[in-house]
Image (spheres, rainbow, N blue to C red):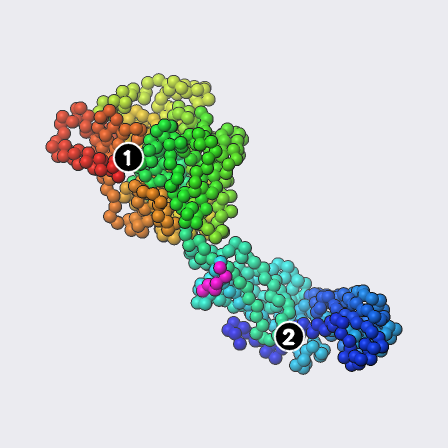
Amino acid sequence: MKKGFIPIVATFFVAIVIAAVAAVSGVIHPNNPFKNEAILGATGSLSANPNPCTIATGQTTCSSTISWTISGSTADVCVSPAGAADQLFANVGSSGSKDATWVSAAIYTFKLKVPAGTCAGSTIASVDVTGKSATSTTTNTTTNSTTNQTTTTNSVDYKFSMTVNMTNVKGEPLKLAGVKVSIDLTDDAKANMTKAGLPIPQFASKQTNSQGLVEFSAIPRRNYNVTISGIPSGYKLAAEEKNPQILIPNTVTNPSPEDKTAVNFKIGKRNEKPNIVVIMTDDQRWDTLKFMPNVQSELVSKGINFTNYFTVAPLCCPSRSSFLTGLYPHNTGVRTNQAPNGGATKFNDSSTIATWIKSAGYTTSLMGKYLNQYNLLKGRIPPGWDDWHVFVGSTPTGSYFNYTMNENGKVNKFGESESDYSTTVLKNRAVDFIKNNKDKDTPFFLVVTPFAPHTGATSEIPPTVAPRYLGTCKDIPVFRPPSFNEADVSDKEPWVANKSPLDGGPLSKLGEDVNHGKDLSKIEYIDFLRREQICAAKSVDDAVADIIKALGDNINNTMIVYTSDNGYLWGEHRMVGKNCEFDECMRLPLVIRYPSLIKSKGTIDKFVLNIDLAPTFAEIAGVKPSSKVNGVSILSLLTNPNISWRSDFLEEFGLDNYVLRNNNYTYGELKNGVKVLYDDKNDPYQLNNLLSDKNNKGLSSTANGEVQTLTRRLGQLKNE
Ligand SMILES: [Ca+2]
Ligand SMILES: [Ca+2]
C-alpha cells in the first residue's frame, strides 16, 4: 500500500473492466470449423464502439454502435443480455452498423450468426460489450467481475492515488523538495457531481518530498486542475505546464486499491542565468527619482541605490557608446554626437555587451534611442541584437511624437495621438517582449532607452509631456542650489566665465508654443524646463511599473537596472545643458533591483561608472567580454559593499577635455590648456576653481603637490 492512499473499503473491487474485446475478424467458429468452412463458407467481423459504454452521471443509458462485415453468406447479429437467451438484433447483408443502448453495468454479447433467419445458427464472430456507470463504485460478488452482475452505488469512497512527478526540460527527473502542489476538481466536474447528488471533496495542498514527488488520493473519472507554486528561485515551470487539467482515468487495466496515475510537470532549471532589464533615460538627473513613485516603491525600496554613480562621458552618444562597450571615450573614439568624431557611424559595433551576452545564450532587445545619427547607418541593425525598435533620425521637438522607428528592419512612422507617445509605445514593446520571452528556455537582455526626459533638439525647446500629465508638475517648488546663477564665475574656464547672469531678459529662441503666449525670463524658463523634464519622466515611471508587472514571478530571477545616460544643469554656474566637468553633468541615478542577490534595500557609495555595467552583465551571463574593457563588474560590490574599490576615475567630454575625479577633488585638464580644480569636500557646489589665476597664486605647496599627483594619475587613466 502506498503512503497517502487510504483504503476505506479494501474489500471493494472496482467494476471497471475493459470488456475483453472479442471482435474476431475472419475467424471460423471453433466449435465446428470444418463444417462451417465447408458448408457456409462465411467469414466476418463484429465490433462495438465505444466499448465499454459509459453511462454518464445522472443518466441511465448510453449507446454504442455495433458494426459488422460478412462475406460468403448471409447472417444475423444476435444479442444475448446477461442471463438471457440470444435475441435477434439485426438482419445483416455484407456489412452494416446499428446503434444499441445499454441500461446498466452488464455484459452484452453480440454474435454474428449464419445462416440468417434464426439466432440458433453458428457463430462466426462475437463481441462482448460492457455498459457501465460513470460513478460506479461497485461491490463485486465474485472474483470475476467480467461475468457477474454487479451492484452500482453512488459513492465516492473509492480512492485513486495520483503522483506528481517533476522533470527538467530535458525530461530528466528533478528532485525539488517543498514545491507546493494543489489539486481541485474542475468546475465542470463539480457541477456534474452536484447534479448527481454527490459531495464535493476538498483536497489539501501538499509539498513535494525529497524525491520531488507528491501523492494525492482522489476519485477517478474526474477532471482536476493541478497547480504548482513555491518553486525555488532559479527554477521555473514550463509555460505549457501551467495549470494543466488532468483526467484521472475512468478505466484501469488491473483494478486494485492502489490504482495510480501520474501527472508530470516540467520544471526547468533553464533560466539559471538571470534576465537583465535596463531602463536608461535620456538626460535625467540623479536627483529626480524622488518624483517617480514607482521607481521608489519598486526599485529604490527593493534594491540598491548607488549614491556615487557617474558617466565617464556626459553626453548622449559618447555615454551610450561607453555603456555598450565598457570603454572610456578615448577607446571608443566616440567623443561627440555627430560624425566625424562621434555619432553612430563612428561607433565600432562589432564587440558590445549585445554580442557578448548573445553569445551566452541571451535573447537581446534594444528599444528606444540607440546612438545619435543612427539614421546614417541606413537601416543597419548592429550585431548582437535579436529584437530592435530604435528611433531613426530626430526632429526639433525630439522623439516624443511624429518620429520614426526601425522595428526589426521595418521603418514605422508614428503620429501625435496619445497612443503614439514614444514612452508609451516603448513600454508596450517592452511588455510584449517580456511576455513573449519570460517563459522561454533562454534568458533575455532587454534595454529600454526612452527619449524622456530629454528636451527637444536644443535646451530652448522643452520636452513633450504625455498628454495625461500636462500641467501636473506646476506645483513642484523651484530649485535654487548655491551654484544656481553663480554670482561670480570669473574663476571658471573662459567659456563659462563669459556667461551672462541668468536674470537678463527672455531666452531669444522661446516661441509662443513654449511660453503659452507670454515671455519668460531665462530663470522662469529654466524653472519651467525643469518641471517639464520631471513631468516627462512620469511616463517612464509608468513604464517601470508595467515592466515589473509583466515580469511577474520572473522578477525573482531578473536584474533590473534603472539609470540615465548623462546629467543636466538647471542654471548651476549660469548653465543649462550637459557635457561639462561639473557634478550635475556627470552624476547619474543608478538603482539595481536583483532579488536573487539583493535581499533588502540598501545604498552603495563607492564610485560606480557607466562603463561598469557591460562587464557586470557579462559576468552575470557567464561570458567574458570579447574585447578589452575599462570598467569592472560590480557583482562583487553588490554582495560586499565594503570590498576594496576604485578611488578615482576619468571623465572625458568634447574632443580634448579630461577630468579626474576622486574622493576629494574634481581636477580638469580642459581644452586650450585650461585647468580647473574643485575641492569637492569643502566646496561641493564647485563655486571656486582653485586653479584660477586669482587662486593659483595663493595655492599652498601642499595643494601644488596634490595637483602634481592628480596630473600624473589623470595621465595614467588616459592611457588605460
Ligand atoms: Ca543624453
Ligand atoms: Ca565662483
Residue visible at 42% across and 54% down? 272
Residue visible at 43% across and 38% down? 382
Callout 1 secondary element: strand
Residue 664 lies in quadrant? top left
Q: Where, quadrant-wise, is the C terminus in this rendering?
A: top left
Residue 669 lies in quadrant? top left
Q: Which residue is mark 1?
A: 651
Q: Which mark is residue 55?
A: none
User: Which numbered disc, 1 or 2, marks the residue closer to the eye?
Assistant: 1
Q: Amino acid at mark 2?
A: Val
Q: Residues within 10 Å of mark 2 (few under 14, many from 20)?
A: many
Expressed as whole percent of the image width and height from the top left, the position of residue 208 reads: 47, 65
CA distance separating discs 1 and 2: 81 Å
User: First in sequence: mark 1 or mark 2?
Assistant: 2
Which residue is farthest front? Answer: 38
Residues drawn in magenta: 170-175
Establish whether ligand 1 lies closer than 8 Å to the Cβ of label 2. no
Closer to the camera in the image, 687 or 249: 249
Expressed as whole percent of the image width and height from the top left, the position of residue 69 reads: 79, 67
Camera sees residue 650: yes
Camera sees residue 535: no
Q: Which residue is mark 2?
A: 14
Q: From this view, report whether residue 488 is shown above or below residue 217.
A: above
Q: Is residue 542 left or right of residue 94?
A: left
Q: Amino acid at mark 1?
A: Glu
Q: Main secondary structure of the magenta part?
A: loop
Callout 2 secondary element: loop
